[in-house]
Image (cartoon, rainbow, N blue to C red):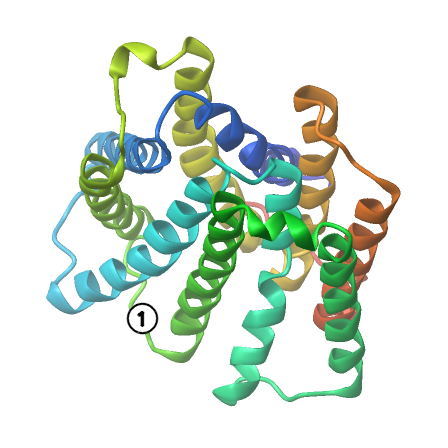
Amino acid sequence: MKNYKLSLAIFTVAIVWGTTFLSIRIAVETIPAWFVAGIRQFMAGIIMLIILLYRKQFQWIGWKNLSHQFLLSFLMLVVANGMTTVAEETVTSSLTSLISACSPILIFLLSVAVGIQKFTIRALIGISMCFSGILFIFWDGIHDLRNPDYAVGILFLFIAIAGWATGTIFTKKLSVQNYNISLNLFYQFIFAGSLQIIFAFLFSDNYNFENWSFKSVAAMLYLAIFGSVAAFFAYHYALTKVSPVQVSILAYVNTIISIFLSWLILNEEISAKFITAAVLIIFGVFVINYNKEMFKKQRINNP
């Protein structure tokens, strides 16, 4: 932590990604979800293009790499981010962040299925804890699933998790050429943003632009500038200084911050059972992904 740039990067990722679910919930109050997701990603792509042009790094990445980036974009931005945004029209941001925190479970199970990881007793314990947490959430509120909008929102969240997990496995299993990370991100953002804006016009019942509130627009801009661009750069900078396992600890911090802010700002009800579920899920995910490297000191190379 003597490296102030690393400290700033970690702080940025923890805080910004911890506010993402809250910002989405505010944005979709008056803006249709697909517009929120599409404009957010398209704006992030334009910002990335400006950065690339300024650095004179903008170039063609080749058809093969482009196809990889489009596939990743579809899975992790269109499906995962898009479905999560749509879900938050009917599901609270605190519940969304908690369910989304379960994504490492599916990532782990898929990793076992394709031979990247081995199944262990510790993993079984962690998965059991996570599923216990999910049961805690829905046990008393199972009747809420009779509400079609709420049920569809929950379904979309699990589809989003599946999209994120599949995209993550894709990057691990296949040899995807990195080239310039900023270039890859530009193509991903532009593709996702364009497709999601098309979805917005196709699937939004009412997109009266004059009804979009200043608060919702501000939240959408925040998601584009900080949630998509700033946090991404901070995350990848942190990865150059510490191990991926150490950076993964931020996922647990993000969930805690998101739940707290949802309670503080949006007055979302956080019951004792919800807190119990959160503890079970977060600790279960931690058990699955635990590695001794998480807490080992590592030498930080100066840039």
Q: Give the secondary structure at mark 1.
A: loop
Query: What residue is rendered at 71% in x and 23% in y?
Result: 267
What's under tag 1, amino acid-wise?
A: Val
* Residue sitting nearer the eye, 198 or 66: 198
Residue 53, located in which quarter of the rendered image? top left
- For label 1, the residue is 176
Count how many numbered circles sit on residues in the image: 1
Q: Residue at x 19, y 35 (%)?
A: 201
**Residue 262 seen in render:** yes
> Relative to 76, is 63 on the left or the right?
left
Tell me: residue 169, above or below residue 212.
below
Q: Where is residue 73 drawn, in percent x and y?
A: 30, 55
Mark 1 neighbour density, 10 Å: few (under 14) some (14–19) many (20 or more): few
Q: Left or right: 220 with respect to 299?
A: left
Can you see residue 251? no
**Image position, residue 164 (x, y; %):** 46, 60
* Quadrant position of residue 169: bottom left
Q: Describe residue 217's horizontal placement relative to residue 129 as left or right.
A: left
Is the residue 18 above or below the residue 170 in the image? Answer: above
Residue 10 sits above or below residue 142 on the image? above
Residue visible at 39% across and 30% down in the picture: 224
Give the residue displayed 57% in from the left and 71% down from the top.
106
Which image quadrant: the N terminus?
Answer: top right
Does residue 292 lie above or below 238 as drawn?
below
Expressed as whole percent of the image width and height from the top left, the position of residue 52 reads 24, 37
Could you tell me residue 218's position as x and y percent?
Answer: 43, 16
The foreground one among 266 and 296 is 266
